[in-house]
Amino acid sequence: MEQEFIITSTNNIEGGNVSKYFGVINNNVVVGTNLFSDIGASFLDIFGGTSSSYQNKLKNIYETSIQNLKVKARNLGANAILGLSIDFDQISGGNKSMFMISVSGTAVLVNYSSNKNENNNLKLKESISNDILTNELTKKQIINKAQKDLLLTQEEWHFIQQNPILSISEKLLTNFLRVYGNTIPKDSDNGKILINNITNYFRILEKETSTNILYEKLIENPTQIFDFIKINNLFSPEKVLWLIEKGEIGVAIICLNINKENYSTNDLSQMIKIIEYLENLEDKGSIKSSKSLLGKDKEKYICPNGHSNDVEKEFCETYGCLLNIKGLSVGQIEQIKEFKIKVETLSSLLKQN
């Protein structure tokens, strides 16, 4: 079972030893309020009540900040955050105000005692809070809706962004593709909600999980899925090599423009292999000899689409084909060149470290 990601205000975790420190990370979220909610809140404060408006705003930006901090930590390879610090503030001016929350902590990698985990699994809880019960019931309700291909409400999306449910991730992506395939109207309320939330949901998931799910759908839906991968910096050298081996050269080259949060020496070796594969692609076109009007042999470049060109032409100029003998376009050649520069730079930086 996957170890829970722990966020704590203390500097240590019981039963765990810090094996690596990734440094301090922080996140700031600013949410605007309007004049009327400010006035309403002040009246409630004066008469001794509580402001549900303020409470809800604070709760939302608090949860968003914590989740964003967690995503940053996971991107670094951490499995816990120590020394969590939270600071709320309100900025006012010109009859307008904003809530701001600043969250910071130290991202770390913690190794846990196996005995501790076994003991915790065997321990019987003496009581369960209503919040835990409510969350579990909400989770089951969302799973049930997803299995029936029903679209989620904004409140349900907010829940799974705070509590990702791996088992329904592929279903959510399938529904997104149905929206873009016009199976579900884009302008429906829940259709709009789906489009507005799903990218952030895949950003919150574990990188490996998001990568596996999205690249599997990439071949069939390159236009829609590529944006997910690029926005979330999910470049995967292993997956690009997989695309090349499947013969999906065009899709693989598009992926060269994607970034990755962190690059390892293993990533570098895989990226070098990508370049080697792309530089040694088999010819899809050919050079053929033909007789000229004077009876002399004349070489012609026959592009992958069968168009005949003068042999000195690198790219086919017939009907805007613009493919070279490998079946690559001018733009694809430029993408490969930029990728090579990126790999050379990365290699130099890793050698310095």
Image (cartoon, grey):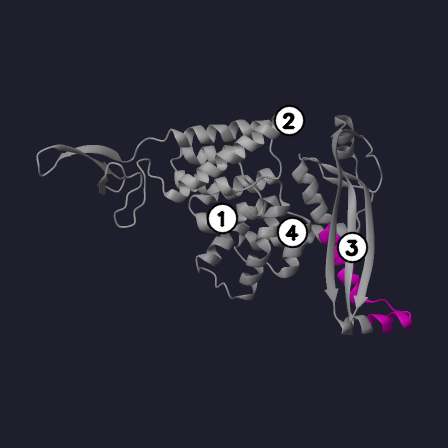
Magenta stretch, main secondary structure class: helix
Which disc, if any, is residue 282? none
Disc 1, SS:
helix
Of the two numbered discs 2 and 4 on the same chain, state the one appearing first in sequence: 4
**In the image: residue 5, left or right of residue 312:** right
Of the two numbered discs 1 and 3 on the same chain, state the one appearing first in sequence: 3
- Does the rendering let one see residue 163? yes
The residue segment tinted magenta is 40-65
Question: Separation of disc 1 and disc 2 at Cα?
Answer: 35 Å
Would you place residue 223 above or below residue 43 in this image?
A: above
Q: Is residue 190 or residue 258 the one in the foreground?
A: 258
Disc 2, SS:
helix
Of the two numbered discs 4 and 1 on the same chain, state the one appearing first in sequence: 4
Question: Separation of disc 4 and disc 1 at Cα?
Answer: 20 Å
Q: Which residue is mark 2?
A: 352
- Graded by Cα atoms within 10 Å as few (under 14), some (14 to 19) or many (20 or more), the crowding at tag 1 reads many
Q: Which residue is mark 3?
A: 101
Placement of the C terminus among the 4 image quadrants? top right
Of the two numbered discs 3 and 2 on the same chain, state the one appearing first in sequence: 3
Q: Which residue is mark 1?
A: 225
Cβ–Cβ under 8 Å for marks 2 and 4 = no
Q: Which residue is mark 4?
A: 160
Rendering coords of residue 327 (x, y %): 33, 39
Mark 1 against mark 3, which lies toward the viewer?
3
Q: Would you say residue 157 sits in the magenta stretch? A: no
